[in-house]
Amino acid sequence: MRVAILGVGTVGEAVARILVRNASIITARAGKSIEPVVGVVRDLNKPRDVAGMHLSTDLSAVLERDDIDVYVELMGGVDGAYAAIKRVLERKKPVVTANKALLAYHRDELARLSADVPFGYEASVAGGIPIIKTLRDGLSANHIISIKGILNGTSNYIMTSMMKGGVKFKDVLKRAQELGYAEADPTFDVGGFDAAHKLLILSSIAYDIHARPEDILIEGIENISSDDIAFAKEFEYEIKLLAIARRIGERVELRVHPALVPKDKMIAKVNGVMNAISVAGDAVGETMYYGAGAGGNATASAVISDLIDIARGINPPMLGYKAPIAPLSLVPKGEIQSKFYFRLNVEDAVGVLAKITKIMSEHALSADAFLQRRDDENSLEATLFFITHTAFEKDAVKFMQILKSSDFVRGEIFMMRIEE
């Protein structure tokens, strides 16, 4: 089976290298050899370890080759990648991709285009963890109750360093960039968008729901402070950037945000750049998947597993459904329910706390835990921390907006959700 790799960066190099290095075991498992024939690159002068694979800068010519059996798309981006894959699928050639942004926006169109053509995308979510096959095949007898995951290793590395080492966000971000965990522009990772794209892919398989990034709640970790870390430690929480899908009746919650998680929960113990996903099914109960969520070799492992499936003649429906199911709707952002954590600086004066609790009661909120701190005995300000009972997102947001306009509040207000 002859393979073209569109985009030969870190992952593309690893795919070519592993296909050659592990050729004997791959051939034994696939039933035929899988050969990397050509790779498309932007710069032919850049050195690459591609085990003798021919390189080309002519994407269009490679897309039209008749001697290629499978195309592996590792270009990144959305529009260019979609155009290339569409051309391949229209020629009835199988495709494997690791492109989560592409799938976040075009998975429905790709599912239609690939109706009778193999399309693998295991590498698009959680690197080397086989979560796509698990949801689509291994748990196919289940109604999925919930998915809860740490899907971005960069953010998890940053939060682990802040929680365990007391390092400030800007300092650990710089270290993550030096180590190659974070890009020069880290917004995609720390802003929650990368995790959101992956969650949308998983939700299509779990619920046949087809939301886009703009439709769901997405928040990042940029505004978490040392004060929030101290509060979390005092109340026995870890802070994690979580991607959450939860079925509630005939509706589904989809959200990505930092959350306070009790320390005794399994997902709270996932540290460093590792990923983990908890999936609860009505028949199987809760299952947990842990492993490397990024990196050339881990992602290449998932790419090659799809290539082996194609070589074996395995062609499941892309999103896991051969027939339509009863449609589920998306829970509007404002109707999502959780407990909330608030941090705010206020004027240190008599009656301020009473004003806050009055505003809370007017917006269906009530306090479950409360902490006040003054860093300086002579300061005219105090920092308040409090946790609410379960409430609607819209009420918590309205409460925060009113506080921002109050004359006793000093500076910004920070809100975070609690996932128990």
Image (cartoon, rainbow, N blue to C red):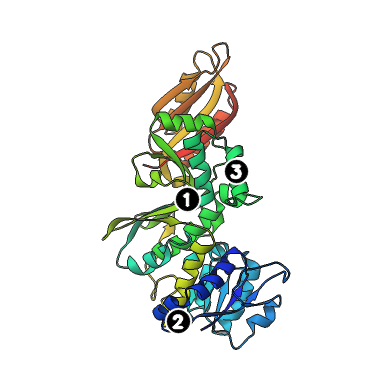
Type of amino acid at the residue the image marks with label 1:
Arg
Q: Secondary structure at mark 3?
A: helix
Q: Which residue is mark 2?
A: 311
| Residue 351 horizontal side relative to residue 250, left or right | right
Nearer to the camera, 42 or 348:
42
Contact (CB < 8 A) between labels 2 and 1?
Answer: no
Residue 255, numbered circle = 1
Hey, which residue is sitting farthest top in the picture? Answer: 378
Q: Quadrant of residue 27?
A: bottom left
**Distance Cα–Cα, label 2 vs label 1:** 36 Å
Q: Position of residue 344 (x, y in %)?
A: 53, 27
Residue 153 rendering spot, x and y as whole percentages: 51, 51
State the image coordinates of residue 56 (x, y, percent, origin top left): 69, 77
The secondary element bearing badge 2 is classed as: helix
- Vertically, is 374 above or below 170? above
**First in residue order: circle 3 vs circle 2:** 3
Q: Earlier in the sequence, mark 2 or mark 1?
A: 1
Nearer to us in this view, 365 or 288: 288
Structural distance between the alpha carbons of marks 3 and 1: 28 Å
Say which residue appears at 48% left-offset and 72% top-offset.
304
Q: Amino acid at mark 2?
A: Ala
Task: Give the CA separation, mark 3 to mark 2.
Answer: 42 Å
Q: Earlier in the sequence, mark 3 or mark 1?
A: 3
Kind of residue at disc 3? Arg
